[in-house]
């Protein structure tokens, strides 16, 4: 008769003791188990512990699911797919027709026109994500897994493209003062929520094998320049950084001006690629990932 297989640990687990402790009502908060006491965990003094937890939870889950590498797609939450942008423009046109000389309504109408123009990047992000996810599945689904900020707009498009290809994708959401919820295309078991922007940005880059930045606002710019700075200063290994939407990016940022002013070096312009569409972006990624 074989000896029984030894357990990995002779002590009760933390989960076991948490259940056991709940059987006896606590005399006071001080009597609660430290890890089961929200008031204690939320103290300012525990910030270092919370930072560590936000790092560990997504990292351990991705490790357990054998996610080796990722492809990050950034982009604006306000750039919706074409038909939604058309509806927004139609609404702006109707409102403007009632007060055609109102400067605020004229401005809102112009913004709606631009959002409709930029809705093309919803489609491009979806196409590129689909292509990347197909390549990921051909490699066993452990590499080049799509990561986004998990929200609406272009983030949704990228998660959607992965779902279209039958693959998984990651969403790194963050708690905001206004309502923030994951888009419906993020793989549920890979949908994370953060309190700390800094830890969230570290997770964007830890497994990244490429970063694709579509048109967006402050958040997109923050994430893009954080990445470029880390590559420029050799804090991370170089990865392809692709700016999709040449016209948008060259109007938004005068990169040559930075060179002329001596703020960056000429070779820093080689840290990123400007492209117009998903096909051009994929050409760069394919050469970088799969060419000998």
Image: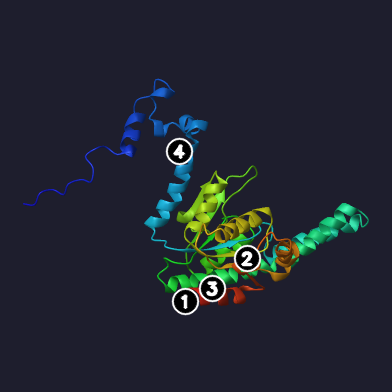
- Where disc 4 sits, the SS reads helix
| Residue that numbered label 1 is attached to | 290
Tell me whether circle 1 and circle 3 mark residues in contact (CB < 8 Å): no
Residue 184 seen in this snapshot: no
Give 115 or 75, whichever is nearer the viewer. Answer: 75
| Rendering quarter of residue 253 | bottom right
Tell me whether circle 2 and circle 4 mark residues in contact (CB < 8 Å): no
Is 18 on the left-hand or right-hand side of 7? right
Q: Residue furthest left?
A: 1
Q: Nearer the viewer, mark 3 or mark 2?
A: 2
In three-dimensional space, the C-alpha distance between marks 3 and 2, rounded to whole angstroms, equals: 19 Å
| Residue that numbered label 4 is attached to | 49
Tell me whether circle 1 and circle 2 mark residues in contact (CB < 8 Å): no
**Image point 55% across, 44% down: which residue?**
196
The mark nearer the N terminus, 3 or 2, is 2
- Where disc 1 sits, the SS reads helix
Q: Residues within 10 Å of mark 3 (few under 14, many from 20)?
A: many
In three-dimensional space, the C-alpha distance between marks 4 and 1, rounded to whole angstroms, equals: 40 Å
């Amino acid at each position: 008769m074989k000896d029984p297989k030894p357990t990995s640990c002779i002590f009760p687990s933390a989960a076991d003791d948490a259940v056991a402790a709940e059987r006896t009502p606590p005399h006071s908060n001080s009597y609660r188990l430290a890890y089961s006491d929200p008031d204690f965990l939320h103290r300012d003094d525990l910030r270092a512990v919370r930072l560590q937890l936000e790092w560990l939870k997504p990292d351990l889950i991705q490790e357990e699911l054998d996610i080796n590498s990722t492809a990050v797609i950034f982009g604006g939450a306000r750039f919706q797919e074409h038909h939604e942008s058309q509806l927004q423009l139609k609404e702006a046109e109707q409102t403007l027709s009632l007060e055609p000389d109102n400067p605020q309504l004229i401005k809102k109408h112009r913004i709606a026109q631009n959002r409709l123009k930029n809705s093309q990047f919803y489609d491009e992000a979806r196409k590129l994500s689909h292509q990347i996810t197909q390549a990921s599945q051909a490699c066993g689904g452990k590499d080049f897994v799509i990561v986004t900020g998990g929200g609406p707009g272009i983030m949704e498009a990228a998660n959607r493209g992965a779902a279209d290809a039958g693959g998984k994708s990651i969403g790194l959401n963050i708690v905001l003062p206004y309502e923030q919820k994951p888009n419906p295309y993020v793989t549920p078991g890979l949908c994370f929520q953060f309190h700390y922007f800094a830890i969230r940005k570290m997770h964007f880059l830890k497994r990244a094998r490429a970063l694709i930045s579509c048109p967006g606002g402050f958040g997109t710019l923050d994430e893009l320049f954080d990445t470029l700075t880390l590559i420029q200063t050799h804090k991370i290994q170089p990865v392809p950084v692709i700016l999709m939407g040449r016209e948008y990016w060259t109007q938004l940022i005068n990169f040559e001006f930075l060179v002329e002013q001596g703020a960056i070096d000429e070779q820093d312009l080689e840290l990123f690629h400007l492209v117009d569409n998903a096909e051009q972006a994929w050409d760069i990624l394919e050469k970088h990932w799969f060419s000998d």
